[in-house]
Amino acid sequence: MPKYYFEDFSVGQVAEYGPRRVSREEIIAFAAQFDPQPMHLDEEAARHSMLGGLAASGWHTCALMMRMITDGFLLEAASMGAPGIDEVKWLRPMRPGDVLTVRGTVQSVRASQTKLDRGFVGFLYEVFNERDERLMTLTCPQMLLRRNSGAAA
Amino acid sequence: MPKYYFEDFSVGQVAEYGPRRVSREEIIAFAAQFDPQPMHLDEEAARHSMLGGLAASGWHTCALMMRMITDGFLLEAASMGAPGIDEVKWLRPMRPGDVLTVRGTVQSVRASQTKLDRGFVGFLYEVFNERDERLMTLTCPQMLLRRNSGAAA
């Protein structure tokens, strides 16, 4: 049985996930597979780019954030997935050796008007490195079952 | 030297990238690494979920789209990266065996008012499978150098 349902979230709630260290090898492996631009693959090329040194694909930061919130609470939640993402801002590059934490803040809660078994929780996720520099912000609606809705998660 | 600069994009331009086949193995491998929810990992669990069968993480669709546009034009463009993503909509699940194409449409072009060497091109990307079902839409601003700006890409 899931531990968290729609009713367990309220505006202003804050939770932290992580830490998660990012290695040079995984930055390069992700980029080689999904975003093979020189500044994500090669230190020398990256040094001459506007990033000034090897930096991860922004999509890699998204993917690691997803893993951290999945381990952090989603696997224990009556999640029905997300219809999409409202906004992503890549504020600073993610570098080899960065140690990530994610702060999740509930920005809105809204019961569905048409499907009575579920509701939407609007999250702001902020990704920080170990120097408390904010690397990324992301807002997205999470669909969750209501408690005692009768439906299986 | 890059082939494409800011000036090479105009509103209404359309380009297609792909095709790219997605295997069951890579769907599971991505999910195991970044989004280990049962409906992305296990056929039996997925059959009993709202997705009705194994489906990729939405982030996997994003990552494959990134690879397709990188190969499609970004590696030949005077790209300065993207400050973020305006919106992602996951419309249908990406399934094992799907053959993806991406259609990119230029929605806006805007020269920077403060940095005269660059401009922003607003793209709408739509990801389709081989049945022409639209799986995802994504809008994002791409920063590009202007031709003859004197700066290196």
Image: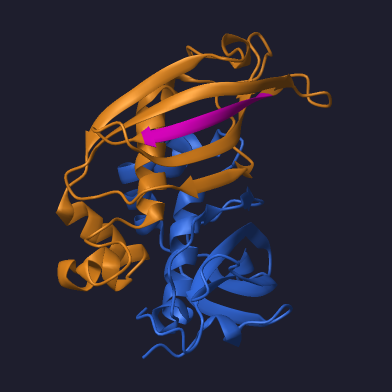
Chain colours: A blue, B orange
Q: Is residue A42 visible?
A: no
Count of residue discs: 0
Residue at 53% across / 65% down in the picture?
Answer: A98
Q: Is residue A110 above or below residue B144?
A: below
Q: Is residue B92 visible?
A: yes
Where is residue B64, by image quadrant?
top left
**Residue at far right of view:** B114
Where is residue A36, by image quadrant?
top left
Q: Is residue B124 magenta?
A: yes
Q: Position of residue B107 (x, y in %)?
A: 61, 23
- Between B85 and B89, the one lying in front of the other is B89
Question: Split into 4 quadrants, where in the image is the N terminus of chain A?
Answer: bottom left
Residue at 83% across / 27% down in the picture?
Answer: B114
Q: Position of residue A129 (x, y in %)?
A: 60, 67
- Between B43 and B75, the one lying in front of the other is B43
- Between B116 and B136, the one lying in front of the other is B136
Asked whether, in this view, residue B88 is left or right of residue A26, the answer is right
Q: Position of residue A148 (x, y in %)?
A: 47, 89
Q: Could you tell me what secondary structure mostly forms the magenta stretch?
A: strand
Q: Which residues are magenta?
A: B120-127
Q: Is residue B147 magenta?
A: no
